[in-house]
Image: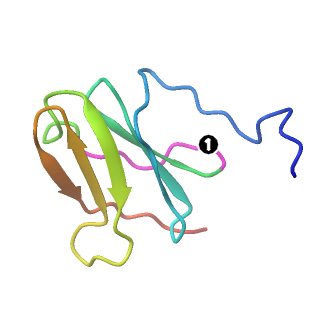
């Protein structure tokens, strides 16, 4: 087993996080927040491009899921506003 005494990376958020999703093909984490936003980070903890907030959820976002092989939307989110949103997030691997 790996020694888990210290974190490899830490991400500080402005609101409580809900059910996050990891994209293995992009090496990214989508974190749905209580403040109606979805934040995207790489596995090192660096923030990546934003999901547009104006057309986002009107209430708390409960979960996010990556659909890596879908051509038109690769990130799905759902929230307490009873809505499911599909996003086309462009991530480049360096």
Magenta-drawn stretch contains 48 = yes
Residue 35 in the image: state x and y as whole percent.
30, 23
92 to 83, vertically: above or below: below
Q: Which SS class for mark 1?
A: loop
Which residue sits at x=59%, y=33%?
11
Dominant secondary-structure state across the stretch colored magenta: loop
Along the line of sight, the residue nearer the viewer: 51 or 21: 21
Q: Nearer the viewer, residue 52 or 71?
A: 71
Find residue 30 and report its horizontal and vertical position in percent: 43, 48
- Residue that mark 1 sits on: 45
Q: Where is residue 59 in the image (x, y as percent from the top left)?
A: 17, 27
Which segment is the magenta one?
44-52
Q: Say left or right for 7 vs 65.
A: right
23 sits to left or right of 39: right
* Residue shown at 17% from the left, 40% from the top: 56
Image spot of residue 49 (x, y percent) = 40, 49
Nearer to me, 50 or 86 = 86
């Amino acid at each position: 087993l790996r020694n888990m005494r210290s974190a490899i990376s830490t991400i500080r958020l402005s609101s409580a996080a809900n059910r996050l999703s990891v994209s293995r093909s992009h090496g990214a984490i989508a974190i749905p927040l209580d403040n109606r936003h979805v934040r995207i980070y790489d596995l090192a903890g660096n923030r990546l491009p934003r999901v547009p907030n104006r057309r986002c959820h009107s209430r708390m976002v409960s979960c996010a899921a990556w659909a890596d092989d879908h051509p038109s939307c690769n990130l799905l989110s759902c929230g307490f506003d009873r809505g499911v949103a599909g996003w086309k997030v462009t991530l480049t691997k360096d």
